[in-house]
Amino acid sequence: MKILIVEDEIGIANFLQQGLEEEGYTVEVANDGEAGLEKALNQKANIILLDWMLPKMTGLEVCKAIRIQDKTTPILFLTARDTIQETIEGLQAGANDYIKKPFSFDELIERIKVHFRNQTETEILRLGTIDINLAKHLVISNKEEIHLTQREFELLCYLVQNKGKVCTRTQIIEDVWNIHFEYDTGVIDVFINSIRKKLNLNKDEELIKTIRGVGYIANDLN
């Protein structure tokens, strides 16, 4: 599960990143509103932790802009601004939760778990005739259950969550493998070939298409 932190106070951002990574989450950090919006729209996260007072764009502006394109990813405001009117503004902008600074890290973890649970209990990803049940870790293609390894499942989910976008090999290595240094991305091709074989797809089909020299894209068009 991937969490995006949008926080301009470096100390708080580092504290959150370290703590969340120790809990087993993959974490991305942006230190201003514009960078946070770009990462939110282009590097699909499962949850967004968003500060209100940010350089370049406020958290409220970022939240509203995200919701134009993304209606479902949970957004949690982490802010010292906690008047009733401000809370209402945040929720009306599309936030799912509101946590006042200073906050208990244990409380934050529990709230994150609740939002993850709510998200996976209801979310079914679809690609053509392929259904992916995140809560049950099931892949169904043409009414037949497909058995994928954990890494194959994560890679397929990543492509489908970014459906219609080209996912470069570097992005996949960073976001799925959580590797942020130079690495042989050829391993991705091995996993893609395995997924295609299990789903009875050939390399020319549009469902999971190779973009030569770049990466892969998932599409519903056949």
Image (cartoon, helix red, strand yellow):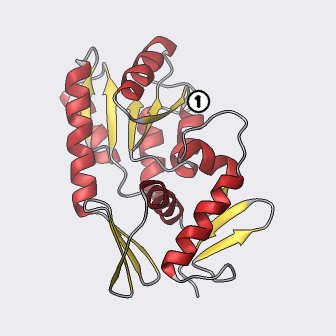
* Residue at horizontal 37 percent and vertical 27 percent from the top: 20
Instruction: Give 181 or 56, whichever is nearer the viewer.
Output: 181
Please state the horizontal and vertical placement of residue 130, each as a whole percent of the image: 42, 79
Q: What residue type is labelled 1?
A: Lys
| Quadrant housing the N terminus | top left
Residue 23 at least partly seen: yes
Count neighbours of disc 1 (C-alpha within 10 A) and say few if under 14, some if 14 to 19, many if 20 or more: few
User: Residue, x 35% and y 56% (percent of image)?
Assistant: 72
Which quarter shows the C terminus? bottom right
The residue furthest right is: 213
> Looking at the image, is 153 positioned above or below residue 39?
below
- The location of residue 4, given as percent across then percent down, is 46, 37
| Above or below 191: residue 23 | above
Q: List x then y, in percent, for residue 160.
A: 49, 66
Q: Which residue is drawn at 43% across and 20% down?
A: 18
The quadrant where residue 16 appears:
top left
Q: Nearer the viewer, residue 111 or 130?
A: 130
Query: Residue extending furthest top?
Result: 11
Q: Quadrant of residue 3?
A: top left
Secondary structure beneath label 1: loop
Residue occupying the point 24% across, 63% down: 122
Q: How many marks?
A: 1
Q: Is residue 3 above or below residue 144?
A: above
Q: Is residue 89 above or below residue 21?
A: below
Task: Kindly identify which residue carries mark 1.
Answer: 56
Residue 85 visible from this viewpoint: no
Residue 142: x %, y % from top left: 38, 88
